[in-house]
Image: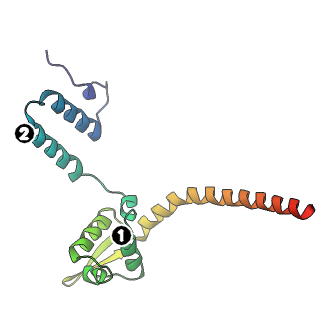
Amino acid sequence: MHQVPLYLREANEKPNKQTLLTGILNFLKKNLQKRKVVFIFATIQLHKLNTGKMRRDVFQAIADPTRRAIIALIALQAMTPNAIADNFNSTRQAVSKHLRILTECELVKQEYQGREIYYSLKIEKMKEIDNWLEQYRKIWENRFNQLDNVLSTIKGQKNGQ
């Protein structure tokens, strides 16, 4: 009798991609230990499957300082990849990779003008970052106000002595 793997046993639940990949990898580790070549091949294929279709988000884009600098550059005006690359001590290919990531995250848009591609900032996605930061901005402002109150109290006690 064939046994259903643990990651597929949940009743009425479709396993998510990560659970499925983890289950398959564990199954392969357990059953293919002696067949190292097959195991290595299967691991590489699973890695390709997992990373090939991963969706990036805006926070991955802004995590890199070079991409933040690119965002700052194109916030002022639309630029070509070569014009952007002129502002960095890196290759045109490295800048293109950063632009691809920014495009995947929908932070920049491409506009074709003749043979040139111009990259410009998509303000709507920047608002998504701002909305996320707003919750922390309120917390910080509240803490600064509390600190200000404590310092005023200490100053008042010092002046009263």
Tell me if mark 2 has few (under 14), some (14-19) or many (20+) residues whose alpha carbon lies within 10 angstroms of its own: few
Q: Is residue 79 depicted above or below 134 in this figure? A: below
Amino acid type, residue under disc 1 in the picture: Arg
Identify the element where label 2 is drawn: helix
Amino acid type, residue under disc 2 in the picture: Val
Sequence-earlier tag: 1 or 2: 2
The image quarter in which residue 99 lies: bottom left
Of 96 and 78, nearer the camera is 96
Distance, label 1 to label 2, CA atoms, is 39 Å
Of 26 and 18, nearer the camera is 26
Which residue occupies 33% across, 62% down?
105
Q: Is residue 102 depicted above or below 146 in this figure? A: below
Quarter that holds the C terminus: bottom right
Which residue occupies 29% across, 84% down?
86
Q: Which residue is mark 1?
A: 67
Q: Which residue is mark 2?
A: 37
Residue 28 got which mark? Answer: none
